Amino acid sequence: MYAILDIETTGGKYNEEGITEIAIYQHDGQKVTDQFISLVNPERPIQPFVEKLTGINSKMLRSAPRFFELAKRIIEITENCLIVAHNADFDYRILRTEFKRLGYNFERNSLCTVTLSQQLLPEMESHKLGKLVRSLGIPISDRHRAQGDAMATVKLFELLLEKDSSKEILKSQIKALHVNQVASKYLAIIEELPTSTGVYYLHNAVGDVLYIGKSKNIQQRVRAHLTATDRKSQKIQKKLHKVNFENTGSELIALLKEQLEIKKNQPKINKDGRYRLYPMGIRIDKTTPYHQLVLEQVRSKEDYLVVFKNGRVAKHLMLRWMETHALCHKHSSLQESDGACYAYKNDNCKGACLEEEPPEQYNARLETLNGVRDYPHNDFLMIDQGRKDGEKSFIYIENQCFKGYGFFELNHQIKTPEKIQHRMTPMEENSDCRALIQAHLKKNKYKKLIPLEVTEVNSN
């Protein structure tokens, strides 16, 4: 990641300048991912020539935030980033000076687009920002203002990245941002990876899958595997030969593919997730006259109301259900003793433990819990981000069952279940799939839901 910035100052003696305006664009190597722009009250006078050059005067800055009010945001947006600026030594020095006044040691590695342009564009007559970008046909507005100059630097840097066929910029980023440098044999692997959301597959020399993972930034995650010092990363670094990946755009599709393919391929380094993401579950056992509410480790052949990552959370919810629906502790996995149950003694059980309540009546009340596992519609599409501009993804639910996922163009209409299935990649549903989908539905982590009772599903 890069933090491309520009700073305007008051001018004055060396290391006595104050910041009057700052603009920072966080960039992942392909696009801007975050930005921060603000005037700054420097609490010191602005030199007349600077005022004339930038158009920023003291009156404009009276109500502007002071640097200490912006410091946290600057730290956050530049964290794990390489500072990029035109004449980076100046901007970085000014930032360090301001943080030093606050008693904070601000340290980042930096890249200078003056130096890079001299190396990659040696034929240019001038490498000053204004003349350089105009010569390259890069539009620049608000010259000598932080936002205008920073955005021009963004466009210049993107051009330099394209020109950098030897990938020296990428190599410098990898080396600078990690104390444990990536081995040179991995640099070619990393530079080919996207910074988008998807699933990645790490292979050994004979092609076996060592590890499967998902990430919102595949390149960043693989780079972390190759620079970390934990046991898992060391195993990867020792055996890695090749990385494959699949862009998904949608984080949910990446999660669904990851858990299913870990179970299918059983990679040696994927200890977590080989069997279940959600190993604990609650189900209704109907093999006895009074049906039982059971909390247990998930088993393949059983059908669960809901599954959990740990038993503590599962037990807490189960107790809450039992209290809300006046369910009997004896007819559950929580109590095995004879006689009246704990809930009956506290007037929260209708007597199933003593056979005072008929089994049919008790079972009917217990059966209402089946509704907690239902999706909002029997048949629907869950629309989310696609792998590229102009594309969207979908999750397909048919008759309350997850069937698979697919992608379609913005100008394409999915009119019938048959057309959906033509564009769909089938996936087998399991309790982990349902839990992942339900979690995304609960948190509204999707673009829109489209019930398939409608006659036409339009992507626009």
Image (cartoon, helix red, strand yellow):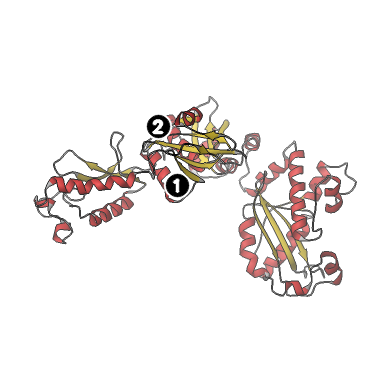
Q: Mark yes or no: residue 103 visible.
A: no
The answer to whether residue 459 is left or right of residue 19 is left
Query: What percent of the width, then of the height, locates residue 52?
Result: 85, 68
Residue at the location (53% across, 26% down)?
Answer: 207
Residue extending furthest top? 206
Q: Which mark is residue 428?
A: 2
Looking at this rendering, what residue extends furthest in the front direction? 455
| Quadrant of the image containing the C terminus | top right
* Side (left or right) of 378 relative to 87: left
Percent of width and height locating residue 195: 61, 42
**Mark closest to the chain's N terminus, 1 or 2:** 2
Can residue 79 be seen at all in this image of the molecule? yes
Amino acid type at image mark 2 = Glu
Residue 340: image location, x then y, percent: 11, 55
- The residue positioned 90% from the left and 46% from the top of the image is 125
- Residue 98: % across, % down: 70, 67
User: Mark 1 packing: few (<14 Cα in 10 Å), some, or many (20+)?
Assistant: some
Of 210 and 443, nearer the camera is: 443
Q: Which mark is residue 138?
A: none
Q: Which residue is mark 1?
A: 440
Tell me where residue 5 sits by quadrant.
Answer: bottom right
In the picture provided, is 133 more to the left or to the right than 319? Answer: right
